[in-house]
Amino acid sequence: MEQNKIPQATAKRLPLYYRFLNNLQMQGKTRVSSKELSEAVKVDSATIRRDFSYFGALGKKGYGYNVEYLLGFFRKTLDQDELTDVALIGVGNLGTAFLNYNFTKNNNTKIVLAFDADPNKSGKEIGGVPIFHIDDLEEKLGNVKVAILTIPATEADRVTERLVSKGIKGILNFTPARISVPDDVRVHHIDLAIELQALVYFLKHYPLDTKEEVL
Amino acid sequence: MEQNKIPQATAKRLPLYYRFLNNLQMQGKTRVSSKELSEAVKVDSATIRRDFSYFGALGKKGYGYNVEYLLGFFRKTLDQDELTDVALIGVGNLGTAFLNYNFTKNNNTKIVLAFDADPNKSGKEIGGVPIFHIDDLEEKLGNVKVAILTIPATEADRVTERLVSKGIKGILNFTPARISVPDDVRVHHIDLAIELQALVYFLKHYPLDTKEEVL
DNA sequence: GTCAATTTGTGAAAAATATCACGACTTATT
DNA sequence: AATAAGTCGTGATATTTTTCACAAATTGAC
Ligand SMILES: NC(=O)c1ccc[n+]([C@@H]2O[C@H](COP(=O)([O-])OP(=O)(O)OC[C@H]3O[C@@H](n4cnc5c(N)ncnc54)[C@H](O)[C@@H]3O)[C@@H](O)[C@H]2O)c1
Ligand SMILES: NC(=O)c1ccc[n+]([C@@H]2O[C@H](COP(=O)([O-])OP(=O)(O)OC[C@H]3O[C@@H](n4cnc5c(N)ncnc54)[C@H](O)[C@@H]3O)[C@@H](O)[C@H]2O)c1
């Protein structure tokens, strides 16, 4: 596809830039420098300029970046105009929180349906999202290509296999299980327990005056 | 402190290794190779050996690693024997999910108290964790050094300042706000909306046959 | 019009991370 | 005892990411 030359580290920062530019525009600001952006999003200004430069010369020397223009550019780049449908699997503590939260506020993704193994949950709705029984996954999933996994770790492999068979291409996995998928399926792990443990480890074992922040 | 030579990337993987070794031990396995570990946690086996090597020679050539020994070693390294107290700020959708989830299951951290601005929430308990009013933060926080932030983004800066004044050294920030802290305070951002957007971006813009998984 | 102050875009360097590949040693087998 | 198979630890190399630092361009003040 278009430019697969954009570094992954850069790609992960794009939504962050986009969100902040949106805020700027709502505040009525028309221009912004990499230095200002840097202070707001806590990314080195040289890194920001480098990130932007992968898409061409978006700014003007001595001036900075035009907010409107930059925002328009990123809107296209991040496909903010088309909504990506997402399925949520596992309507427990975490899943319920996600359903109640309106991801679309600032965003191009939307949870359109959810599944759970508990018959007391299926048939209902949370946050306007219908919940189906997991047995009906194949029937109801339709053409959705992205799934959020918030089920017990023990179920992760089995359910993942079904999702993949049905054509899911991206999984945001909140279970501690490291699931196996074919090469054409992308998995991002978000492991909250590990994030907390890692934070504690850094606190205890690293000098107290670093300035790095770790994603 | 002891060895600050351990790369951050390695440090972030330690809790993952630890968790898997625990599983192995519960299954009664006594030895494990970097190759097996690699398949389970989806990290290249050379990377695993390199990670371990920062702590010295923990394995035996031709044999692999002794599960018991390795586990004991990591238990000490990750301070699994002492419990770190954590405060949770903001008992909303996400905060409630965290309180209901038992972080201590596999873990050395425990949410011991929570705060919220809503008077209907303070005074109650969720998952055994008492909820106080945010006005009582300074009074109740005690010696807790780590906080989880699950409040609206608009409140993030104000509350962070109070946390920092009270001596908090580590913040797990779930709000979209990029908070400012002194150099001796460590912030890890977990930005769920951005994770989802980044996943969608990768799906749309990257070749469909990569094998990398992105943290 | 001149000049000081900004700020980009980027070559080059540095730093961080991941991977290759192999010698050395261990274990298991016959 | 000899041999084959397995595995670590690590020097070397590759890749990725960040940062430095400065020429070139622009702006804004007077
Ligand atoms: N809640 C947290 O704070 C937290 C923190 C870290 C990790 N996690 C992980 O996130 C995942 C979800 O956590 P949770 O607290 O929401 O758990 P939960 O038990 O509250 O919810 C799990 C839900 O999945 C449903 N389920 C079970 N098997 C299923 C299946 N085969 N198909 C569809 N649905 C099924 C259950 O009915 C339940 O509603 C777990 O893997 C957990 O380890 C949660
Ligand atoms: N829920 C999600 O799925 C989700 C996803 C992505 C990001 N987030 C972010 O996580 C944060 C929390 O999300 P949520 O859905 O739980 O929100 P929420 O509105 O359900 O909960 C926020 C809670 O914080 C409390 N609060 C408000 N101001 C406070 C203050 N000054 N001090 C203490 N408590 C205060 C509120 O009373 C409420 O209980 C938000 O910043 C949100 O953007 C949430």
Image (cartoon, coloured by chain):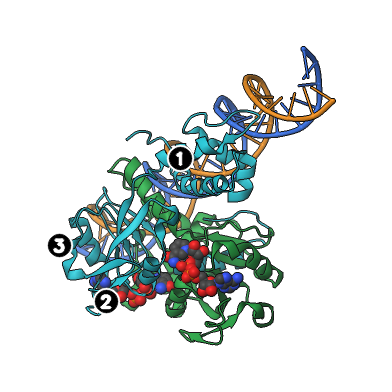
Chain colours: A cyan, B green, C blue, D orange
User: Would you say residue B35 is visible in this rendering?
Assistant: no
Asked whether mark 2 lies closer than 8 Å to ligand 1, one says yes
Query: Badges 3 and 2: C-beta atoms under 8 Å apart?
Result: no
Q: Nearer the viewer, residue A124 or B126?
A: A124
Relative to B84, is A144 on the left or the right?
left
Q: Is residue B133 above or below residue B69?
A: below
Q: Kindly identify the residue that appears in the image at 45 percent across and 84 percent down.
A: B127
Residue position for label 1: A74
Q: Nearer the viewer, residue C30 or A137?
A: A137
Q: How many marks?
A: 3
Residue position for label 2: A121
Could you classify mark 2 by the number of other residues whose Cα lies within 10 Å: few (under 14), some (14-19), or many (20 or more)?
some
User: Would you say residue A60 is visible in this rendering?
Assistant: yes
Could you classify mark 1 by the number of other residues whose Cα lies within 10 Å: few (under 14), some (14-19), or many (20 or more)?
some
Residue position for label 3: A139
Instruction: Give the letter of the chain under mark 2.
Output: A
First in sequence, mark 2 or 1: give its number. Answer: 1
Query: Badges 2 and 1: C-beta atoms under 8 Å apart?
Result: no
Asked whether mark 1 lies closer than 8 Å to ligand 2, one says no
Task: Give the secondary structure at mark 2.
Answer: loop
| Residue A145, image x, y percentages | 26, 53
Q: Report the amino acid beneath label 2.
A: Lys
Relative to B86, is A126 on the left or the right?
left
| Residue B197, image x, y percentages | 40, 51
Task: Give the secondary structure at mark 1.
Answer: helix
Mark 2 vs mark 1: same chain?
A: yes
